[in-house]
Amino acid sequence: MRRALAVILVALGAQTGCGMDDSAEMECRCAEDTDLVAFPHCRDADLTTPRSDAGDPFSTRIPDCPSGALLFLREATDPEAVLLNVRDTFEGFSPGQYMDQLTDDFLFAPDVDGVETYRSVYLPPDGYHPDPPDVDTLWTRDDERRFANNLLDRQEFQRIQVIRWYDASKDERILSADEPRQETYVFPYQLELTAQPHEDGAALVTDVRGRAEVRLVTPSEENPVWTAQRWQDFRDEASTKPTLTELRGEYAQ
């Protein structure tokens, strides 16, 4: 397992005004929104390790490794804004900001066929079905972070286009009578991923389709901040295209 701390060389001019020359060294700590192109050693870093400088007011705090350029996203004051932010972070290659849209206890429930295709990734128990208690054994927030970092990589893809996503005029919104701080959205999705071109200039295009059921929650009705807590994936029976379950299986590590 790679360390979450690393010593990096700061290139001449990269820290203008900081009084650092081309031989200066800066120690930084990998974070969820670290720019993985600039800091590739952070790709598989263990982010669960407690900070060595935590709890000591007299210690020198190690800064997080810098993030890439941030996208302009909507405030998460309603669930639909979060769903649109998810779409935009995919198209904008922003894994750190994508993870900001998810709860700490986020769970992804894969479709059954996709699980069978990627058994070595999901490691399903015998008789698995995407309902509790099995759902929490397959894909958690840590798995989702690795997937997002691997998928949303401009060295891998030149473009990710979300062709079909949640549409309030067409898709289903389910309110909870018992819990007003919870809403569920059901909608078909279609993503088109264009890989970086080969030497001959040809680029592989992958079409991903399925149906998503996303539950979003907020801790407060007075000052709502919505995040996605559970995402269940379903295969489109009329399509032979891979689903997001299979895409996660392909880019799990």
Image: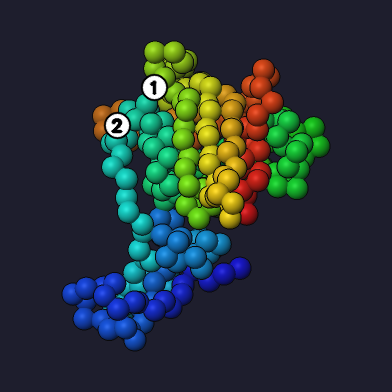
State the residue lying farthest toward the right. 126
User: Residue 227, located in which quarter of the rendered image?
Assistant: top left
| Tag in front: 2 or 1 | 2
| Residue 157 seen in this snapshot | yes
State the residue lying farthest toward the top. 170
| Residue 49 seen in this snapshot | no
Residue named by callout 1: 180
Q: Position of residue 219 (x, y in %)?
A: 36, 35
State the SS at label 1.
loop
Which image quarter is the N terminus in? bottom right
Q: Which residue is found at the position 32% from the left and 45% from the top?
A: 71
Q: How many marks?
A: 2
State the SS at label 2.
loop
Relative horizontal placement of residue 70, taking residue 117 as reference (left or right): left
Front-lying residue, 128 or 242: 242
Q: Is residue 145 above or below residue 30?
A: above
Relative horizontal placement of residue 125, taking residue 215 as reference (left or right): right
Q: Which residue is found at the position 42% from the left and 68% from the top?
A: 29
State the residue lying farthest toward the bottom. 23
Q: Residue 77 shows which numbered tag?
A: 2
Q: Position of residue 180 (x, y in %)?
A: 39, 22
User: Residue 213, located in which quarter of the rendered image?
Assistant: top right
